[in-house]
Image (spheres, rainbow, N blue to C red):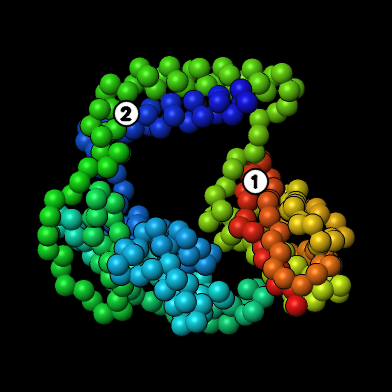
């Protein structure tokens, strides 16, 4: 409990401290374009079929979560496609913006392993600031007219923080110091080393894929785990673990990949045997590895087994 509290305090202190240092270094507040950030979130969600995240950045009056899911699945077939090398630019006028996204759309086979096609795509996004949050209100393959403001932009929490950054420095330093002390004390008591650097799900899902086979109740099936090393250095000590539901037997919960060289694709397989028909979730799918002398770890979304 103390370690968790220490990390939370460190996190709060760092946020405030980074905001202050950013202001001091630049002399003014120049955060990333929020309209661009909204579109980037949408495209990253598309790569992982994360309908929940996509629906949070698309105005519900324009597209509901159900509509996004149906369109991505039945019309665009995004399951085997990936958005890569996205270049985003924006034009903003008050509470309205137009974001132009140029990217490469790569299509893979059913195993999400072999590349079978590639296309350069340009999409235009209409983005509106609604109650302080930038939301996508239009998506088009045809150019959109320049944005024309229809109202003022409401301030967000980040705006208020940056406006008062000078007052945050003493509190930030205090929180940071207290958090570090608590965290170090807890680690010393446990006698353990520093933990792994955590990777967001959207990042780790770019190079790790879990592909279940068709399976029936009482019969063995498989879940292939593919890992692609897109970097110039090797991954070492690569391990994938997961928690399996009751009613699904597995030969071994830990998959040891060892070392994956630059450009190499590796595969390990869980052999599973569901005892009944239905839909089962393999959760807490965690990937851990060492890269560049540092330890990293991240969790994937649950893997769903459809058992006939």
In percent of width and height, residue 150 lies at 12, 59
Q: Residues within 10 Å of mark 2 (few under 14, many from 20)?
A: many
* Residue 99 in which image quadrant: bottom left
- Residue where numbered disc 2 is placed: 20
What is the CA distance from the residue labelled 1 to the residue labelled 2? 29 Å
Label 2: element kind = helix
Do tag 1 and tag 2 residues touch (Cβ < 8 Å)?
no
Residue located at (64% from left, 38% from top): 196
Residue 212 seen from this side:
no
| Image vertical order of residue 308 relative to residue 248, above or below | below
Quarter of the image with the N terminus in it? top right
In percent of width and height, residue 14 lies at 44, 29
- Residue where numbered disc 1 is placed: 297
**305 to the left or right of 164:** right
In percent of width and height, residue 67 lies at 42, 74
Q: Which of pointers 1 and 2 lies earlier in the amino acid sequence?
A: 2
Question: Camera-side residue: 105 or 149?
Answer: 149
* Residue 142 in which image quadrant: bottom left
| Image vertical order of residue 111 relative to residue 48, above or below | below
| Image vertical order of residue 13 relative to residue 87, above or below | above
Residue located at (86% from left, 74% from top): 219
Q: Which mark is residue 36?
A: none
* Residue 31 in which image quadrant: top left
**189 to the left or right of 204:** right
């Amino acid at each position: 409990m103390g370690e968790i509290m220490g990390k939370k305090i460190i996190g709060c202190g760092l946020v405030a401290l980074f905001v202050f240092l950013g202001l001091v270094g630049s002399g003014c507040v120049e955060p990333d374009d929020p309209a661009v950030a909204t579109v980037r979130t949408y495209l990253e969600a598309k790569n992982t079929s994360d309908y929940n995240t996509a629906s949070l950045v698309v105005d519900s009056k324009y597209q509901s979560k159900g509509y996004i899911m149906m369109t991505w699945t039945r019309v665009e077939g995004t399951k085997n496609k990936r958005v890569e090398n996205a270049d985003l630019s924006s034009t903003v006028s008050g509470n309205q913006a137009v974001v132009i996204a140029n990217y490469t759309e790569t299509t893979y086979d059913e195993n999400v392993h072999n590349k079978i096609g590639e296309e350069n795509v340009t999409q235009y996004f209409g983005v509106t600031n609604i109650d302080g949050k930038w939301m996508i209100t239009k998506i088009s393959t045809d150019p959109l007219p320049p944005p024309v403001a229809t109202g003022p932009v409401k301030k967000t929490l980040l705006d208020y923080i940056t406006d008062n950054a000078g007052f945050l420095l003493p509190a930030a330093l205090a929180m940071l110091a207290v958090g570090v002390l608590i965290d170090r004390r807890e680690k010393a008591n446990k006698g353990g080393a520093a933990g792994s650097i955590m990777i967001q799900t959207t990042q780790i899902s770019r190079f790790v894929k879990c592909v279940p086979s068709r399976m029936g109740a009482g019969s063995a099936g498989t879940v292939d785990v593919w890992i692609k090393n897109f970097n110039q250095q090797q991954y070492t000590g690569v391990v994938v673990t997961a928690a399996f539901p009751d009613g699904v037997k597995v030969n071994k919960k830990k998959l040891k990949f060892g070392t994956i060289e630059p450009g190499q694709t590796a595969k390990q397989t869980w052999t599973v045997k569901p005892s009944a028909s239905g839909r089962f979730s393999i959760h807490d799918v965690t990937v851990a590895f060492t890269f560049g002398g540092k330890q990293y770890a991240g969790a994937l979304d649950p893997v769903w087994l459809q058992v006939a």
